[in-house]
Image (spheres, grey):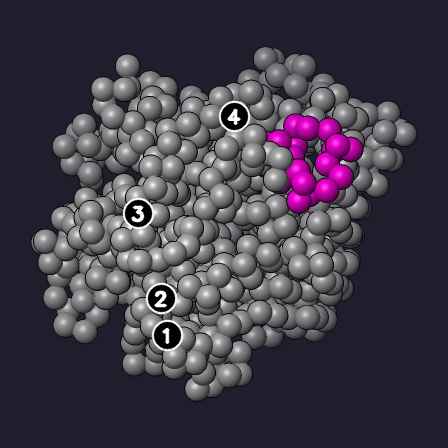
Amino acid sequence: MTDSTTEQTVSAASFPHDSGNPLLEAWKTPFETPPFARIRPEHFLPAFAEAFAAHDAEIAAIKANKVEPTFENTVAALERAGRLLTRVSAVFYDLVGAHSSPELLEIESEVALLQARHWNRISMDAEIYARLTRLRENAAALKLTGEQSRLLERTWIRFHRAGAGLDTAAKARMAEINERLAHLATSFSHNLLGDEQDWVLELGENDRDGLSDSFVAAAKAAAAERGLAGKAVVTLSRSSVEPFLQSSTRRDLREKVYKAFTARGDNGNGHDNNATIGDILKLREEAAKLLGYDSFAAYSLADSMAKTPQNVRDLLERVWKPARARAMADRDALQGLITEEGGNFRLAAWDWRYYAEKLRQRRANFDDAAIKPYLALDNMIDAAFDVARRLFGLTFNERKDIPVWHPDVRVWEVKDAQGRHKALFYGDYFARPSKRSGAWMTSLRDQERLDGEIYPVILNIMNFSRGAEDQPCLLSPDDARTLFHEFGHALHGMLSNVTYPSLSGTSVFTDFVELPSQLYEHWQERPEVLQTFARHYQTNEPLPEDLLKRFLAARKFNQGFATVEFVSSALLDLEFHTQKAASITDVHAFEKRELEKIGMPAEIAMRHRPQQFGHIFSGDHYAAGYYSYMWSEVMDADAFGAFEEAGDIFDPKVAKRLHDDIYSSGGSRDPEEAYIAFRGRKPEPDALLRGRGLLDESEAA
């Protein structure tokens, strides 16, 4: 996933300020990167106050200009405004997500309200909106470049969708809604983090049956990080929970871990998110109706590739039927295994991964534990870098002289094929209590060249389980795929080649932004990559040919389960945002009703239950948009076919089109136009089903 909280910033030298506050001073660090060791929580509120004031003054200057609106004095001026605010926000939200503290979380609650009030004033400003409208109506006579035309249209749309065209009373209510939603989204995120921080399961010596040495080492490292040196714990990080459910022979402990994981934010305690969800849905619906839409989903999707809720529903239902059928067949096979072993119980959700792994070993003679020793984190980082070198000519050189927010963080300087500086890339890979769960890409600085070349500073944040002191971090195949996924997002930011910051990198439609990331996953599982970088962490022996073949053959195993857990979450997201909010009086009852409607297998849980669904409730970037991963998967499965058709997964001509039309163009062109430019046609939806092994070639008529 990406994180849209940070926008563009510029060189720190643009606003030196001898205030004793490092956020307001010129940064005398390599590449003018944030001096994290000097930045303390108490610096943020004064820095935000100054940044808000500076931005307000810049907006006032645009409005005070009595000259007829032009692209330069309005649209470009808006692009230049707010750079100090973006700089401060980028550092703040990086720390809140990746290395929080009680002090920062308390500040975030205040900052969320201040941000909402600040952006309400700007995005609903009638004078700015009037200037943009005049420019838009006269666009044909302005002789704009393609990128400028796109920016004008996107800027007008942004103001229009924020409510700049509403009457005074409606604007006032919209401002109130935005402020309340900002508070609720922050509360949702804090509640989720609170439940995740509060729970661990200590594993005694008798509780470790079935667990690999690498898992136990990671569990000991997690315990030490929580002040429990010498013990071993399961945490509520997905990278801890899923391998435990897959490997532990202790059914009672699997049940305990599963129930704790799926109950995050739903424990009736001070971290409970149920009431928050109801409030968010009501306010989103009201905002959508103020803007003339029947539902929040209709509002959100109007500015997407999908366009309408029905188009999203059509895609999800197209996938749901074969996925559910496959999952039900697998369920029966798993129940058969239990019976065969003499088990006198029905398959439950906490059993699925454990018995699916047994079934995979039987059918494909493969299990994750066999390949993990060959997927050391450093080797997979090198693999991701090497694919970028072979596709795009990039090289990565680690830098030890750049400040970081935690000792785990690593930084690389990125150079292009000519050896010129291209970007900085930060990698923060290990789970810790101060980090929110999940994996994401964000930025400290985005590429632009409005007033000279600004090079991007891109971040990947993960939550992998740490290895023991004498062992490297060993990744599961899913972890390795996640690393490539987020690095695909990172490349989208690093390869950006646009003039205007609002169009930089990942500033694209939500249902297009996952294309570069999901497409990049394909290279991680290719023999051409694994044969070079999958090496045993102890012997350095390459991945054996036989194990490689079994791994590749097993890739599509359990895809019914994986697709069902995703699509059910996406369908529930859509229903939350299309049905009347007043009818959703009980989140549990709504969840139960909707899952029964689609025939959700009781033995499979949604990938994200509502109370922990941060994608859609910790902000609105993916609200009514969780389907985007699958919409993009239609494109990524089809897009990788261009390399397969060329007979070379590093084909230079295809790679150049991929660079020019997808990775470097940012939001400077319509996404459908960009995809067609790369592929020569629209994507074929059945490529997704074939890729997941859910559609036979004979069915693809």
Residue 530 percent coordinates (x, y): 19, 53
Q: Which residue is found at the position 85% from the left and 29% from the top?
A: 170
* N-terminal-most mark, 3 or 2: 2
Q: Which residues are magenta?
A: 573-591
* N-terminal-most mark, 2 or 4: 2
Q: Secondary structure at mark 4?
A: helix
Q: For marks 4 and 3, give the CA distance.
A: 36 Å
Q: For marks 3 and 2, give the CA distance.
A: 17 Å
User: Are there few (<14), some (14-19), or many (20+) residues within 10 Å of tag 3?
Assistant: some
The answer to whether the residues at label 1 and label 3 have Cβ atoms under 8 Å apart is no
Disc number lying in front (4 or 3): 3
What kind of residue is marked 2?
A: Thr
Residue 584 percent coordinates (x, y): 73, 36
The answer to whether the residues at label 2 and label 4 have Cβ atoms under 8 Å apart is no
Residue 306 can be seen in this image: no
Q: For marks 1 and 3, give the CA distance.
A: 25 Å
Q: For marks 4 and 1, give the CA distance.
A: 43 Å
* 92 is higher (above) or lower (below) than 519: below
Mark 2 — residue?
A: 249
* 680 is higher (above) or lower (below) than 356: above
What kind of residue is marked 1?
A: Arg
What kind of residue is marked 3?
A: Gly
Furthest residue in direction left, as rendered: 545
* N-terminal-most mark, 4 or 1: 1
User: Are there few (<14), some (14-19), or many (20+) residues within 10 Å of tag 4?
Assistant: many
